[in-house]
């Protein structure tokens, strides 16, 4: 029984030493390596040409690895279609490290790609191309949002003068 206990202690010591050296050389702990391997799930927009969306641009959400705070991307990254401009809708002025409300671990860069060829059909085709690119979590149309109250252009009513908003 004493020999068994001695062997068990030696085996435990050797295994523990091996794991300690392995994690020290790899520069990570088991928890960190597991957390960094969490895969972001790509989402797909279900096309409907009858939806109320802009026919001149698409929106793109980059994954954490490919996107970044104020990161610029070459037009060629997005595929082989004419691009008029790319706007970073998540652009941050100043030093992002000073923003206490910014969750760096869950930040996703959001881009607006303005298209040269303006049509709903082109928007749908471009979205299908973008969905196939590694590094893009979601691509979809730039939907119009309806305002709660439209200004009355006939008499020059402004929002600040409207009693509905006070």
Image: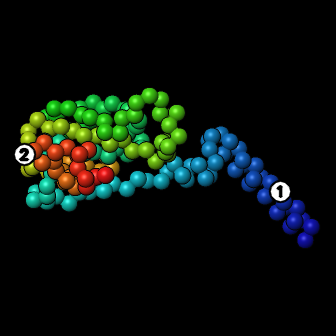
- Tell me which residue sits at (88%, 61%) in the image: 6
Residue 163 appears in the picture as rendered: yes
**Residue 88, how many percent across, how many down?**
31, 36
Label 2 belongs to which residue?
154
- Tell me which residue sits at (25%, 53%) in the image: 163
**Residue 104, how many percent across, how many down?**
49, 42
Residue 81 appears in the picture as rendered: no
Is 32 left or right of 161, judged from the image as shown? right
Q: Which dot marks residue 34? A: none
The answer to whether the residue labelled 2 contacts the one labelled 1, judged by CB atoms less than 8 Å apart, is: no
Residue that protrudes farthest toward the right in the picture: 2
Label 1 belongs to which residue?
10
| N-term-proximal mark, 2 vs 1 | 1
**Residue 20, how many percent across, how many down?**
72, 47
- Tell me which residue sits at (47%, 29%) in the image: 95
Q: Nearer the viewer, residue 59 or 36?
A: 59
């Amino acid at each position: 029984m004493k020999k068994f206990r001695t062997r068990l202690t030696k085996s435990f010591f050797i295994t523990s030493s091996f794991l300690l050296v392995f994690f020290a050389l790899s520069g990570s702990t088991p928890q960190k390596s597991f957390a960094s391997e969490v895969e972001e799930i790509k989402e797909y927009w279900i096309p409907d040409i009858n939806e109320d969306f802009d026919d001149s641009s698409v929106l793109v959400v980059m994954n954490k690895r490919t996107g970044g705070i104020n990161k610029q991307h070459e037009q060629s990254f997005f595929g082989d279609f004419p691009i008029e401009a790319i706007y970073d809708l998540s652009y941050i002025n100043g030093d992002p490290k000073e923003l206490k409300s910014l969750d760096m671990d869950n930040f996703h860069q959001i881009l607006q790609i303005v298209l040269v060829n303006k049509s709903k059909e082109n928007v749908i085709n471009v979205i299908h191309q973008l969905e196939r690119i590694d590094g893009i979590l979601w691509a979809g149309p730039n939907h119009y949002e309806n305002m709660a109250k439209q200004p009355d252009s006939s008499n020059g009513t402004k929002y600040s003068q409207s009693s509905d908003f006070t």
